[in-house]
Structure formats: structure tokens, C-alpha cells
Amino acid sequence: MASLTLEEIEAEIDVIQERMRSEHPGEPRVVAARYDPATSRVLVELSNGCLFGFPVWMVPGTSRATPDELERIELEPFGEAVIWSDINADVHVTGLMLSVLNVKTWAAKYMGSITSPAKAEASRENGKKGGRPRKRATGE
């Protein structure tokens, strides 16, 4: 298998990034990031214009890093993570946001629980009757 040139790799990244934007238009991606030494926070700008900041200590591998090392922040090519190559540390921004904002609990509170006592009871009753009916094959 032939190796790709740097130009070919960069061209592929451009194509992939455009495809990600077109296939996932509602998913915000990281478009910029910087380390703020005054507050010891990482500030990321998302493709939808929102800003999100978090303490750098939330990223494993950054505890012994110097401010200079933390300022050399890079973006993962698809805008999903921020990376510090010099110290071998990175963080998936969406995952961090979901975790620190406790989205699972908020979603249940504001959008309704996926499970509820009524749903659990209905499921138990359905189980007593033999479970969910099988789907019929098309054409029957």
C-alpha cells in the first residue's frame, strides 16, 4: 500500500471535514481553542458560535504540564477534541460537556424520563402476556 503525501492527507482531511459538516449540521464542532493561564481554563469555540470553558485539571495528563505546554493546544481534525501533543493529553469536548453539565439528569428532568414507574409496570404486564408481539415480515 502506497503512503500518502502530506498534501494528499490534508486534502482528505478537508473532504472529511466538509462531509462531517454536511452529514452532522446540528452537531457543534470545535473550531478554536486556547488555554487561559490567568484562570487555568481551556476555552473552546464551537461551530455554532457558542463558547465553552473548563478547568484544565479536568483533562487527564495535564497536572504536571507547564503553562507553555498548555498553550500549545491543537484541534483534532474533525473538531471533536482538543489535543496537547507535547504532553500526550487530549479530551473529547462533547463528552466532557455532557459529563460536567450532567446532561443525562437534565434531559430526564426537562424532556421526560425514558423510564418511568408507569412504563415499567406496562412492561411487566406485557411480559406476563408473552412479551412484545413479533414484527410481521413485509408482504404478509
Image (spheres, rainbow, N blue to C red):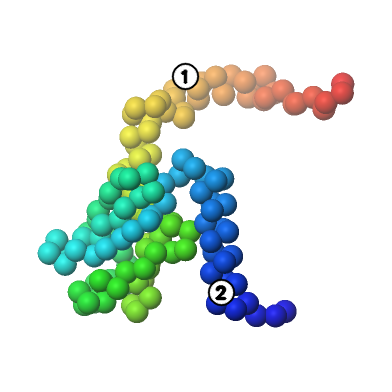
Q: Nearer the viewer, residue 76 or 98?
A: 76
Closer to the camera in the image, 6 or 55: 6
- Residue 19's x, y, as percent? 57, 52
Q: Which residue is the site of mark 1? A: 118
Residue 93 screen position, x and y as percent: 37, 55
Q: Amino acid at mark 2?
A: Glu
The residue wearing badge 2 is: 7
In percent of width and height, residue 127 lies at 63, 24
Q: Quick check: can you spot residue 49? A: yes
Side (left or right) of 57 relative to 17: left
Residue occupying image coordinates x 40% and y 60%: 81
Vertical placement of residue 44 versus 89, above or below: above
Q: Can residue 56 be seen by looking at this rendering?
A: no
Q: Give the residue at x 56% y 45%.
A: 23
* Quadrant location of the C terminus in the rendered image: top right
Taking the spot 38% from the left edge, 56% from the top edge, the residue there is 31
Q: Residue at 40% of width from left, 25% of height from top?
A: 112
Q: Secondary structure at mark 1?
A: helix
In the rendering, at what x and y percent does residue 41 appear? 21, 60
Classed neighbour count for the residue bearing mark 2: other residues with Cα under 10 Å, few (<14), some (14–19), many (≥20): few
Image quadrant where residue 122 sits:
top right
For residue 21, side relative to residue 3 (left or right): left
Q: Kindly indicate the quadrant of the structure image that contains residue 124.
A: top right
Q: Is residue 82 left or right of residue 7?
A: left
**In which quadrant is the N terminus drawn?**
bottom right
Residue type, mark 1 in image: Ala
